[in-house]
Amino acid sequence: MWSLSFALLISCISLTAQQDPTEIPKCETCNELAQKIPNAIQELHKIKLEPNDTRVAKMIKMCTDMQGCDSCGIPQQTKDTVETTCNLLDMVNKEGFTACASKLSKENPDISGYECLEGLDFYDKSPASSCVRATTKKECVKKIMEDKCGKDALVDYDKIIDRVVKLLDCK
């Protein structure tokens, strides 16, 4: 954490004459965000997140603000981590989808009648199984969610599943 903050500070202090001096306050803000985001993420991990939690919205705003820090020399890996975090938090904030996923995970309803699963263990939480559910079994999972939770669970379903595929680096 200190190395990122220090790198940002050095980057902001060493603006050349060719760079816009108005970037200095922006880099200071980015430095503050770089310090706040890890702490905020740790706090969110400690609590049970619910859809539309104001703390999630605050964190999403911080992530979004951090994405505007391109000119401050932030490493690509840090930017990618922030983007991944924002995407995950955005998914948590989708009430219907998250509520349904939570319900299915807790209640483990009988889904043996869904032949479209073709023997896939729907409740296996491994990344490989998650990738199968998000790719080749995407429509089957959509049907299960609609049947078990209603149409509200499908709001932004395709967008969320596309993010899951990207986040898990599914092939």
Image (tube, rainbow, N blue to C red):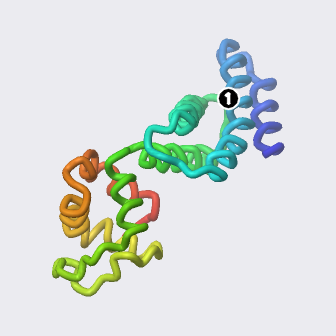
Q: Would you name the residue on which mark 1 appears? A: 30
**How far across and down, in percent of the image, does residue 158 sit?**
26, 52
Task: Indicate the amino acid at tag 1.
Answer: Cys
Q: In terms of depth relative to the viewer, which is nearer, 69 or 157?
A: 157
Q: Is residue 91 left or right of residue 115?
A: right
The structure residue drawn at horizontal position 24% and vertical position 51%, both measured from the top left corner, is 154
Asked whether residue 91 is in view, the answer is: yes
Residue 164, by quadrant, is bottom left
Residue 137: quadrant of the picture: bottom left
Q: Is residue 70 visible?
A: no
Q: Which residue is the extreme one toward the top?
A: 22
Eyeballing the image, is 81 above or below 122? above
Closer to us: 87 or 26: 87
Name the one closer to the observer, 103 or 61.
103
Q: Position of residue 132 (x, y in %)?
A: 33, 74
Q: In front here: 10 or 5?
A: 5
Q: Tag 1, which secondary structure?
A: helix
Q: Quadrant of the C terminus?
A: bottom left
Q: Residue at x 52, y 50 (%)?
A: 84
Asked where in the image residue 25 lies, by quadrant, the reply is top right
